[in-house]
Image (cartoon, rainbow, N blue to C red):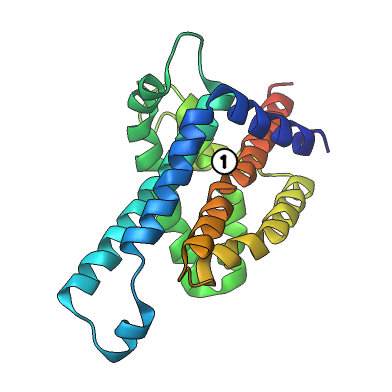
C-alpha cells in the first residue's frame, strides 16, 4: 500500500532532517536502561526504597520517551516551515497529552471487558495523537473531538486490518524490548536501538492517518 511506502519515506526523512533528535531518543533509551532498569534478582528477594525509586524513574522516562516519539514523528510529518521542534512541542503537547490520556482511558475500559474489544478500540483510536496535533487548538472537545474523528477515519475495515497487520509484524520487536533483561552494555545498546525503532512503527501510523484524511476530504 502507498501508506506503507510513505511510512518508510517519513522515517528516513526524520533521520535526515533531525538526526540529533533521533540520537537524543536513542541516548534517552540507553540511559533509562543503564541507570533506572531495576535489578530483577534483588526484587525477587526484597523491595528496597531505592528500588521503588528506580522503578518510578524508569516508568517516568519510558512515558516521556513515548510522547517524545509522537512529537518527533508529528514534527517530521506535519510541521510548518520555520517552526523548530521545541516550538512544535510547545504548540501541540497539551492537546496530545489530553487526548491520548482520554483515548487510553477508553481503551482500558474496553480492555476490562475482553481483550478483543480493547484491541478493536485501540485500532479505532490509533490516529488520536496526530489528529490532536493538527486540530484547531481554539476549538473545545465538544466542537472537535479527536477520539470521534479517529473513529471516523478508521471506519474502513481494510485500513483496520492493514494497521492490525503492521502491529502484529511489529509485535516481536516490541516484546523483545519489553522482556529481554538488559544485563550488559551490549544488551542495553541493542534494546535501546529496538526501542528507538518505534519511530518506524509510528511513521506508518502517521502515514495511514494522512492517507485516510486525504480520502475523507475527497
- Which quarter of the rendering shows the N terminus? top right
Q: Quadrant of the C terminus?
A: top right
Q: Residue at x 41, y 29 (%)?
A: 143
Q: As displayed, is residue 48 above or below residue 152?
A: below
Specify whether residue 131 is in view.
no
Location of residue 130 in the rendering, given as x and y in whole percent from the top left corner? 52, 34
- Residue 198 visible from this viewpoint: yes
Residue at the farthest front position: 185
Residue drawn at (32%, 59%) of the image: 35
Quick one: label 1, few (<14), some, or many (20+) residues within 10 Å? many
Which residue appears farthest toward the top when viewing the image?
A: 82
Dot 1 lies on which element? loop
Residue at x 40% of width, y 46% of height? 28
Residue 205 is left or right of residue 104, and the answer is right
Quadrant in the rendering for residue 56: bottom left
Residue indicated by mark 1: 127
Q: Residue at x 81, y 33 (%)?
A: 2
Q: Quadrant of residue 97?
A: top left
Amino acid at each position: 500500500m502507498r501508506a506503507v511506502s510513505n511510512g518508510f519515506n517519513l522515517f528516513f526523512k526524520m533521520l535526515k532532517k533531525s538526526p540529533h533528535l533521533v540520537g537524543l531518543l536513542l541516548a534517552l533509551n540507553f540511559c533509562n536502561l543503564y541507570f533506572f532498569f531495576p535489578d530483577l534478582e534483588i526484587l525477587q528477594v526484597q523491595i528496597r526504597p531505592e528500588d521503588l525509586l528506580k522503578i518510578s524513574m524508569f516508568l517516568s522516562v519510558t512515558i516521556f520517551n513515548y510522547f517524545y516519539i509522537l512529537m518527533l514523528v508529528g514534527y517530521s510529518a506535519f510541521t510548518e516551515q520555520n517552526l523548530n521542534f521545541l516550538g512544535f512541542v510547545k504548540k501541540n503537547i497539551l492537546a496530545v497529552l489530553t487526548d491520548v490520556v482520554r483515548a487510553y482511558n477508553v481503551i482500558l475500559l474496553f480492555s476490562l471487558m475482553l481483550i478483543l474489544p480493547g484491541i478493536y478500540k485501540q485500532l479505532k483510536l490509533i490516529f488520536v495523537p496526530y489528529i490532536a496535533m493538527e486540530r484547531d487548538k481554539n476549538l473545545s472537545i465538544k466542537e472537535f473531538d479527536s477520539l470521534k474523528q479517529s473513529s471516523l477515519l478508521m471506519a474502513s475495515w481494510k485500513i483496520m486490518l492493514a494497521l492490525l497487520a503492521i502491529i502484529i509484524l511489529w509485535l516481536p520487536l516490541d516484546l523483545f524490548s519489553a522482556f529481554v533483561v538488559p544485563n550488559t552494555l551490549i544488551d542495553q545498546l541493542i534494546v535501546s536501538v529496538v526501542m528507538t525503532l518505534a519511530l518506524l512503527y509510528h511513521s506508518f501510523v502517521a502515514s495511514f492517518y494522512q492517507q485516510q484524511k486525504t480520502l475523507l476530504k475527497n
